[in-house]
Image: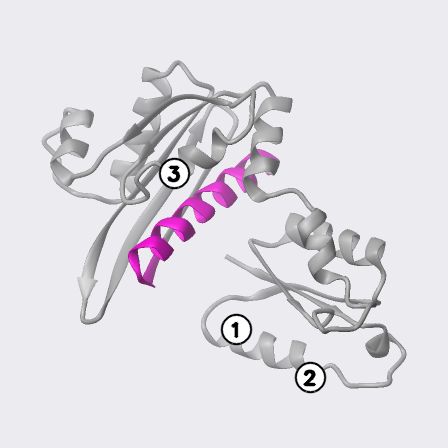
Amino acid sequence: MNCAIVTIGTELLLGQITDTNASYLAQELNRIGLPVALHTTVGDDYTQIKDALSEALKRADLVITTGGLGPTEDDLTREVIADDDTLHGVVINLLNKRRKTLGIVETFTGGMLTARLCSSLPSPVRESIVIGSREQVFSFLNTKRRVIDGKAGEALATKIRTVGNSSIGLALLGSIKAIEKAYEVYAHVIVSGRDVNGSYEWKMGGDIPTLQSRGATIALNTLRLALIS
């Protein structure tokens, strides 16, 4: 996983102030193992900001903006982002334009990923299953193997693709565990198709709604990257 930093502010381009935010962000991101693939600076111009964000989204898994969020009239970042398409909207359009259909298996997200991909018509989702327990995973796979990992995710993605007669199978697999005063999930997302493949795994802490929402978002972005690669 890599990152892009987009710094926004005409005063930066004019040399009126020094961009210390980007330097700090790059150091901290690299410290936690997230390399910065792109850093760009643009002025307070709607088109420049939109173009910079579009390019950053093509080249990085995560995009961080700094600047351009103040109370003055020339701070346009919120306006640009609000006018841009949603992540699930981008994925739906990519699937429909390429005439791809999708089969989904979800676990800890409880159907949240499917709901986002069915939010507009025509939806590319042909088959969707929510599995609530480890035993249901093994039963669906009809296997004696009792390990929840990337290999199980690959098997789930392949099976849901076959069951739904879909172009692509996606498995979002993980279990939420209580840790002290919060919760933690160790998760895998697998995308499997004839010419569309991708995977990602992560470990994250937080409250349950946040873990579910971020899980669905990570799955959408993994699918997006698989479709454009």
| Disc on the earlier residue, 3 or 2 | 2
x%, y% of residue 16? 86, 85
Residue at x 60% of width, y 43% of height: 86
Magenta stretch holds residue 208? yes
The span from disc 2 to disc 1 (Cα, nearest Å) is: 16 Å
Residue at x 65% of width, y 42% of height: 85
Q: Is the residue 22 above or below the residue 49 in the image?
A: below
- Secondary element under disc 3, as helix, strand or loop, is strand
- Which amino acid, mark 3? Ile
Magenta-drawn segment: 202-229
**27 horizontally vs 200: left or right:** right
| Disc on the earlier residue, 2 or 1 | 2
- Which amino acid, mark 2? Thr
x%, y% of residue 14? 90, 79
Q: Main secondary structure of the magenta part?
A: helix
Mark linked to residue 146:
none
Q: Quadrant of residue 49?
A: bottom right
- Secondary element under disc 1, as helix, strand or loop, is helix
Q: Residue beneath label 1, please?
A: 30
Q: Residue beneath label 3, please?
A: 190
